[in-house]
Image (cartoon, rainbow, N blue to C red):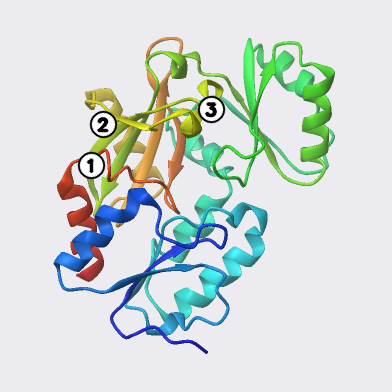
């Protein structure tokens, strides 16, 4: 079994892109400035000795949704022999986006969401008609990078229904009201480092090309109601004080911020776009 020098901070990646993602380069530099060593290792590297790592930090593990059971088994194994960041219980809970309904039950304003369990045979038309939504978005409950996410019309097309039927036969799905503000005001990502709100960026909507249409994160100021929603979501998830967290939100038709996603597992943290001290703060937290 290949070994990891004692003291390394391992930044977990994935096999198709084993190197460190560009956005995490400031974190790597901050670790080096503090005299720490680091290495990027795909999470499914079977010959790697995870027990020798000082910390295993989930970063660009972005194929986990294709093998979620294997990913969770790996996280459990790593957590048993090393310090997993973020901790295993948050990874387990955050992997399936059904957590949106739990947060809503705790009073967190979320974008209206229906969870469709695998194999139930519910149609898109039934959901949008019952909800009265002018547009919707369908996505797998376990996914990353907008995989198999698509728009849904008020009267879903045969193509949309067929796609949903194919996906929902195999996996749990979410259907959510489309939040039109992502097209102008934009979706806001509030990044928290070591339990503190660090910075925010505007993320380009999937329906405007997503991150593939150019630089994804544009720094934006944080409004008081956005700050309050982020704090409320993290508190409801018992996730305040984590090494990192990202709270994604947009404004509803009344102009109020609603939660789009709470990312505690492997979110992009927009270090390249954020203040330089944000990566330094995470490095300090990891070494502490």
Q: Name the residue under label 2.
A: 227
* Numbered disc 2: secondary structure: helix
36 in relation to 282, above or below = below
Q: Which residue is rendered at x = 42% and y = 57% of the image?
A: 59
Front label number (3 vs 2): 3
Count of all numbered marks drawn on residues in the image: 3
* Numbered disc 1: secondary structure: strand
**Crowding at mark 1 (Cα within 10 Å: few <14, some 14-19, many 20+):** some
60 in relation to 198, above or below = below
Whole-Å distance between the Cαs marked 1 and 3? 25 Å
The percent coordinates of residue 25 (x first, y second) are 30, 55
Precedes in sequence: disc 1 or disc 2: 1
Q: Which residue is rendered at x = 27% and y = 43% of the image?
A: 272
Precedes in sequence: disc 3 or disc 2: 3
Q: Mark 1 points at which residue?
A: 197
Q: Mark 3 points at which residue?
A: 206
25 in relation to 174, above or below = below
What is the quadrant of residue 159 in the picture?
A: top right
The percent coordinates of residue 285 (x first, y second) are 22, 62
């Amino acid at each position: 079994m290949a070994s990891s020098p004692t003291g390394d901070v391992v930044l977990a990646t994935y096999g198709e892109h084993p190197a460190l993602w560009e956005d995490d380069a400031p974190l790597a530099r901050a670790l080096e400035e503090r005299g720490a060593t680091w290495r990027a290792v795909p999470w499914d590297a079977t010959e790697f000795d995870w027990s020798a790592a000082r910390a295993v930090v989930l970063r660009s593990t972005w194929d986990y949704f294709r093998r979620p059971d294997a990913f969770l088994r790996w996280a459990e194994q790593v957590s048993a022999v090393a310090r997993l960041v973020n901790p295993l219980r948050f990874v387990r809970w955050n992997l399936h986006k059904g957590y949106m309904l739990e947060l809503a039950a705790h009073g967190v304003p979320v974008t209206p969401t229906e969870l469709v369990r695998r194999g139930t045979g519910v149609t898109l038309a039934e959901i949008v008609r019952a909800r009265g939504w002018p547009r919707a978005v369908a996505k797998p409950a376990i996914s990353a990078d907008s995989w198999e996410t698509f728009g849904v019309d008020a009267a879903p097309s045969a193509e949309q229904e067929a796609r949903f039927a194919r996906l929902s036969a195999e996996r749990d799905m979410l259907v959510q009201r489309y939040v039109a503000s992502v097209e102008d005001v934009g979706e806001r990502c509030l990044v928290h480092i070591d339990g503190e709100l660090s910075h925010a960026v505007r993320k380009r909507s999937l329906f405007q090309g997503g991150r593939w249409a150019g630089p994804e994160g544009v720094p934006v100021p944080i409004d008081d109601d956005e700050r309050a929603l982020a704090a409320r979501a993290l508190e409801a998830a018992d996730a305040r004080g984590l090494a990192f967290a990202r709270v994604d939100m947009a404004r509803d038709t009344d102009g109020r911020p609603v939660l789009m996603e709470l990312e505690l597992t492997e979110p992009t943290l927009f270090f390249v776009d954020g203040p330089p001290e944000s990566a330094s703060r995470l490095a300090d937290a990891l070494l502490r």
